[in-house]
């Protein structure tokens, strides 16, 4: 884990592609894409159901680790239409009814309103704000209100180069003075390789740790 201070509050970056804000008891993830593997199976591609199960297990581990009051998803919690993968999440939700869930809707969140209501998921169409922080799906949609903006959508990745011409592509967090870009929570997503800019802090995510990356 890596701890940062933004707008006077601690932000904890977790290796499971999540961040936690202790002051608010807020666990934040982006781009869960629940149902993506089931969607591809319906299209005839042999994607194992264990893909979705692993993501749900990682979420369960985060909830046990931090015991948050609120789970906030900054868009694309669900990938497409209802399928068997979503039923697995429904079971998980039954055992975690105490947890408040907030979803800032993303471009993939197209389920019927009754499904969100059944799972007790609070919907925000554009942004969710708390204190000095604003959470949106796409940073382009962030209001110009001076708040620190957290977003997802892009599935950021960073290319690390080692000796002997070794290269590794890893998901990453990207921070600057006023914004943070979160990695896709789901492991079943591609990466958008970012071109780091001066003044940005890049944190690569491996299976065992979050580590700062010096790009310059």
Image: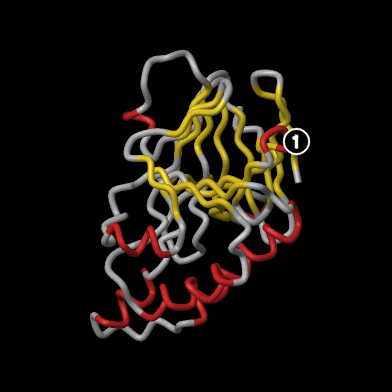
User: Hey, which quadrant is residue 95 in on the image?
Assistant: bottom right
Vertical arrangement, residue 12 with respect to residue 97, above or below: above
Horizontal relation, residue 211 to residue 105: left or right: right
Image coordinates for residue 213, horizontal then vertical, percent: 66, 38
Q: Which residue is mark 1?
A: 3
Residue plotted at (66% across, 47% down) = 69
Vertical arrangement, residue 139 with respect to residue 145, above or below: below
* Residue nearer the viewer, 106 or 157: 106
Vertical arrangement, residue 111 with respect to residue 205, above or below: below
Residue plotted at (38% across, 15% down) = 144
Colouring method of the image = secondary structure
Q: Secondary structure at mark 1?
A: strand
* Residue nearer the viewer, 155 or 196: 155
Residue plotted at (47% across, 34% down) = 135
Image coordinates for residue 181, horizontal then vertical, percent: 50, 36
Residue plotted at (48% across, 72% down) = 90
Horizontal relation, residue 11 to residue 152: left or right: right
* Residue nearer the viewer, 36 or 88: 88
């Amino acid at each position: 884990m890596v701890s940062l201070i933004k707008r006077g509050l601690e932000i904890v970056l977790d290796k499971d592609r999540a961040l936690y804000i202790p002051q608010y008891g807020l666990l934040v993830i982006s781009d869960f894409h629940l149902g993506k593997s089931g969607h591809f199976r319906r299209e005839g591609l042999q994607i194992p159901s264990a893909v979705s199960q692993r993501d749900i297990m990682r979420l369960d581990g985060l909830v046990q680790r931090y015991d948050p009051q609120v789970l906030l998803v900054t868009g694309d919690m669900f990938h497409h239409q209802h399928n068997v993968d979503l039923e697995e999440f429904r079971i998980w939700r039954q055992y975690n009814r105490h947890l408040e869930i907030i979803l800032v809707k993303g471009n993939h969140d197209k389920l019927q309103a009754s499904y969100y209501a059944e799972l007790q998921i609070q919907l925000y169409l554009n942004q969710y704000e708390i204190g000095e922080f604003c959470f949106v799906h796409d940073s382009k949609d962030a209001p110009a209100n001076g708040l620190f903006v957290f977003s997802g959508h892009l599935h950021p990745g960073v290319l690390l180069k080692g000796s002997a011409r070794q290269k590794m592509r890893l998901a990453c967090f990207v921070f600057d003075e006023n914004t943070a870009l979160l990695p896709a929570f789901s492991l079943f997503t591609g990466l958008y390789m970012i071109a780091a800019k001066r003044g940005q802090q890049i944190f690569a995510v491996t299976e065992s740790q979050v580590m700062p990356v010096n790009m310059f």
